[in-house]
């Protein structure tokens, strides 16, 4: 069976369970040995059960901003590090004291594996109402409510799902946006765009926003799938998921532009005009005051959310940064999976002062090394990050 034919969303119980740490050595086809389990445990993390980072960019609006969390503002250390041999190759979400990534579930306090390795996942999970949603090869957990959804034509599903108001919104591998009942897995509606969709949608105030490869931004009713408006952006923005806040949709672009678009009618409120050029691949992060974006040459830029004027620009002397997140007036950002290093940075949101940096270790896979990360999440004073070397770090002050 091909990869595309098996692409699906799986729903499974996200409850706890216990399992010992596997300590065996595993020999893979490439000939290297892998020791499964915690490779470091300096201390537990004081993680509150209510702490949550449920989606790839924190919320259904893709803001990357958690207004209720706090994170480390001084030098960090490793509380624990977990090594997976087959999983952990995706971004992280946190819910109910647990860390989900790449098909594995870890105790957020101790780093212990709660269920053992499942089917490896390469797409970011989403957690809502005690349920984990993956696209691609799903999480094979027990539970009477498990379901899968396969779009018409067996064309598969790729981007990270977004869950809002008991509905899963996810693009297929073609030009279709699907709305699926989060409890039953039945299709509620579908919407056809003019081009292929390769990014996560954003949902706010009963409207879904999506960008396709024709660089067109669409606003669609979250309840019915009826189009409200569509506007061609005239810039290469199809790689950048939209973020929605302050009655505006914020978009980065491969051309280096950042623009704010009115949610009411799709007209442009402002676009960045400072002439600083760098490619933007992922979503921006947004609060009421600022918009943050990262570039492919290591830049981090902050704009005024109302006017689009540049507030500060910092160069991390690295490249291929992942998307930024904002927690408690601190900007957290790391190298992306495409990077040759695994650095994580913290900056003040007000002026871009660097507070600390940390570097994950490089992992050898026999014929090559892996060092990039999938971007940090920040909850309850801790930073969690997964790496392309299939490791998960919990960092604390």
Image: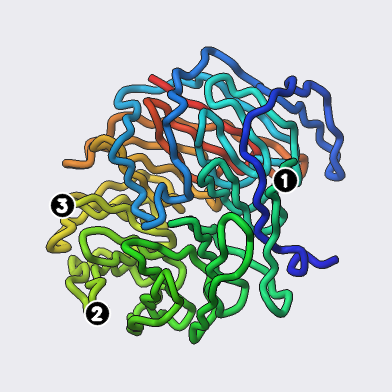
For the point 50% across and 49% down, the residue is 336
Extreme residue in the top direction: 43
Asked whether the viewer can see residue 42, the reply is yes
- Counting other residues with Cα less than 10 Å from the Cα at mark 2, is it few (<14), some (14-19), or many (20 or more)? few
Residue wearing tag 1:
144
C-alpha span from label 1 to label 2: 43 Å
Q: Can residue 341 be seen in this view?
A: no
Left or right: residue 379 compared with residue 5: left
Check disc 3: other Cα within 10 Å, few if <14, some if 14-19, many if 20+: some
Q: Residue at coordinates 71% horizontally, 25% vertically from top-left?
A: 37
Q: Which mark is residue 309?
A: none
Give percent across and percent down for residue 343. 46, 37
Q: Which image quarter is the N terminus in?
A: bottom right
Q: What element carries label 2?
A: loop
Q: Distance between the residues labelled 2 and 3?
A: 27 Å
Q: Mark 2 points at which residue?
A: 265
Q: Which residue bears the numbered disc 3? A: 311
């Amino acid at each position: 069976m091909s990869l595309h034919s098996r692409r699906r969303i799986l729903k499974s119980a996200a409850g706890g369970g216990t399992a010992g740490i596997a300590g065996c050595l595993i020999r893979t086809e490439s000939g290297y040995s892998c020791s499964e389990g915690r490779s470091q445990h300096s201390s537990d993390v004081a993680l509150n059960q209510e702490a949550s980072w449920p989606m790839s960019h924190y919320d259904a609006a893709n803001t990357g901003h958690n207004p209720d969390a706090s994170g480390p503002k001084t030098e960090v250390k490793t509380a624990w590090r977990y090594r997976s041999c087959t999983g952990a190759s995706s971004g992280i979400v946190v819910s109910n004291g647990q860390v989900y990534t790449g098909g594995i579930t870890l105790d957020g306090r101790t780093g212990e594996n709660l269920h053992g390795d499942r089917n490896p996942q390469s797409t970011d999970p989403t957690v809502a109402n005690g349920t984990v949603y993956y696209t691609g090869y799903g999480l094979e957990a027990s539970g009477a409510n498990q379901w899968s959804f396969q779009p018409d034509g067996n064309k598969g599903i790729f981007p990270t799902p977004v869950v809002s108001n008991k509905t899963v919104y996810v693009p297929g591998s073609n030009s279709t946006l699907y709305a699926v009942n989060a409890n039953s897995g039945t299709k509620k509606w579908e919407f056809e765009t003019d081009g292929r969709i390769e990014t996560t949608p954003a949902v706010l105030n009963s409207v879904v926003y999506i960008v396709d490869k024709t660089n067109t931004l669409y606003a669609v009713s979250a309840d019915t799938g009826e189009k409200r408006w569509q506007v061609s952006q005239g810039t290469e923005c199809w790689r950048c998921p939209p973020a929605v806040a302050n009655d505006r949709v914020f978009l980065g672009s491969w051309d280096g532009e950042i623009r704010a678009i009115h949610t009411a009618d799709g007209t442009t409120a402002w676009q960045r005009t400072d002439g600083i050029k760098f490619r933007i691949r992922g979503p921006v992060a947004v609060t009421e005051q600022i918009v943050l974006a990262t570039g492919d040459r290591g830049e981090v830029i902050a704009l005024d959310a109302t006017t689009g004027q540049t507030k500060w620009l910092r160069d991390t002397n690295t490249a291929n940064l992942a998307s930024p997140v904002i927690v408690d007036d601190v900007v957290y950002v790391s190298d992306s999976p495409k990077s040759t290093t695994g650095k994580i940075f913290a900056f003040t949101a007000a002026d871009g002062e660097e507070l600390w940096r940390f570097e994950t270790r490089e992992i050898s896979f026999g014929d090559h090394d892996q060092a990039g990360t999938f971007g940090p999440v920040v909850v309850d004073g801790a930073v969690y990050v997964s790496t392309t070397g299939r490791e998960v770090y919990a960092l604390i002050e």
